[in-house]
Amino acid sequence: MKKLIAYINKNVLVKVASLQTASLLTKIIAGILTSKAIAIFIGAEGLALIGNLRNFVSSVQTISILGFYNGVVKYVAEFKDNTVKLSKALSTVFYVGFISTFLISFLCYFYADSINNIIFPTYNNYPYVVKIFSIVLPFYALNMFAFSIMNGFSNYKMLIIINIIGQILGLSVTLLLIYQNKIEGALISVAIAEALICLITLVGIINRRSLVSLIKVKQISFKFLKKMSSYSVMALFSAVILPLVLLAIRNYIIDNVGYKDAGFWEAMTRISKYYLMLISSLMALYILPRFSEIDGIKEFRKEVFSFYKTVMPMFGLGLIIIYFIRPYIVSGIFSDEFQPVEDLFFWQLLGDFVKVLSIVIAYQFLAKKMFWHYVVTEAFLVIMLYLTSVYLIDIYGVKGAVIGHFVSYLMYYAIILLMFGSSLFGFDTEKT
């Protein structure tokens, strides 16, 4: 525990201080206020539609930038003192991303009716929302390109300030649109929220405007593009497939149980997201860089079990407290209409606990660039998530979705333990 605290004090708090905490709290508060507004002005059925659009938007945004973000951050940091290599990296990502984004925007715009039928089932008709999203998508891509450059240059303070301002701006626009236009306003806010930050980001990189001269068509490098491919595929797989699977599960609930129950499930996943933000940020800031630093099995084992012994008991206690105060959480974040959500907490919390147990170990895939291990295990997870959810929804109704969440992550955790058995427990799984 002392080592964990010392590392955080040295490498995290000194760099980002209270700004990181402020950014995280701003994001959580913005999410809660948005959820409250949706509960008051729209209701559970509208929340289901908003959840579908969010999943679609999230997947398409990642596809549009080809999952380049993490790769750009790495190579900008690596090449920031080498103008030639930096120029190739920026030029390749900018122009390839530019073509990809406009192609995706074009497809979304002209196939808006077909997309509408997928993400807004039965009686809803919002193709114009999809068209609005397609128009603002290039601004999102430009924003992420600028973000990756600032991240690569370790401009943490500016990044966090932009995030905070962006969250406040997004919240203000969302609340105004929901108040004035109800469900249509909420959907439009989802479509444009990420793109709104673009103007703020561009202001933030004025001091890096000299980089613009490095972005040239002739500097596009297919060799560099090949280097980016592993980062791209890994990002695309997790950030695209999972939201689409969640969208498919929600549509299954809509078709077989009802819109309102789909809204209750969406409410539960939102609450889960809020408390998982805290531990996810800790894992991203500590576990990933720490696993990247260490090479030996002994150190890897030590770090995993140290996290299990120090952080997981506190996380487990927090989940227990959340379970017992769930009526206040539901009424506080949503409204009395969402009281049935209380019945979904047990399996969701249990699943989230197992999820964190497994992700701590699975970060090794990213740290050591274990490409195929990552893809195979993620594929197994999303397939099991969909199959178990659909099977259990038929038996238990909407509660089946949260039971499926627990069962799928339990199986995923079992696979992870088998793969890292010799590293964690000192035995060779192939000989047992």
Image (cartoon, helix red, strand yellow):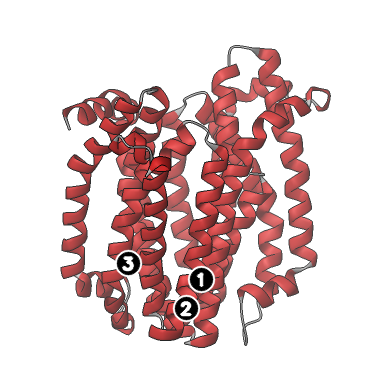
Amino acid marked by disc 1 = Leu
Amino acid marked by disc 3 = Gln
Residue drawn at 68 percent across, 63 percent down: 132
Classify mark 3: helix, strand or loop: helix
Q: Measure the C-alpha gap from mark 3 to mark 1.
A: 17 Å
Amino acid marked by disc 2 = Tyr
Q: Measure the C-alpha gap from mark 3 to mark 2.
A: 17 Å
Which mark lies nearer to you, 3 or 1? 1
Quarter where residue 223 is shown: top right
Which residue matches tag 1?
387
Which residue matches tag 2?
391
Quarter where residue 222 is shown: top right
- Residue 49 is situated, as x and y percent measured from the top left of the image, at 53, 75
Which residue matches tag 3?
348
Can residue 198 be seen by looking at this rendering? no
Can residue 11 be seen by looking at this rendering? yes
Which mark lies nearer to you, 3 or 2? 2
- In this rendering, the answer to whether 30 lies above or below 143 is below
Residue drawn at 32 percent across, 37 percent down: 427
- In this rendering, the answer to whether 23 lies above or below 225 is below
Q: How many marks?
A: 3
- Residue 118 is situated, as x and y percent measured from the top left of the image, at 65, 74
Confirm or deny contact between disc 2 and disc 1 (CB under 8 A): yes
Residue drawn at 59 percent across, 24 percent down: 75
Which image quarter holds the N terminus? Answer: top left
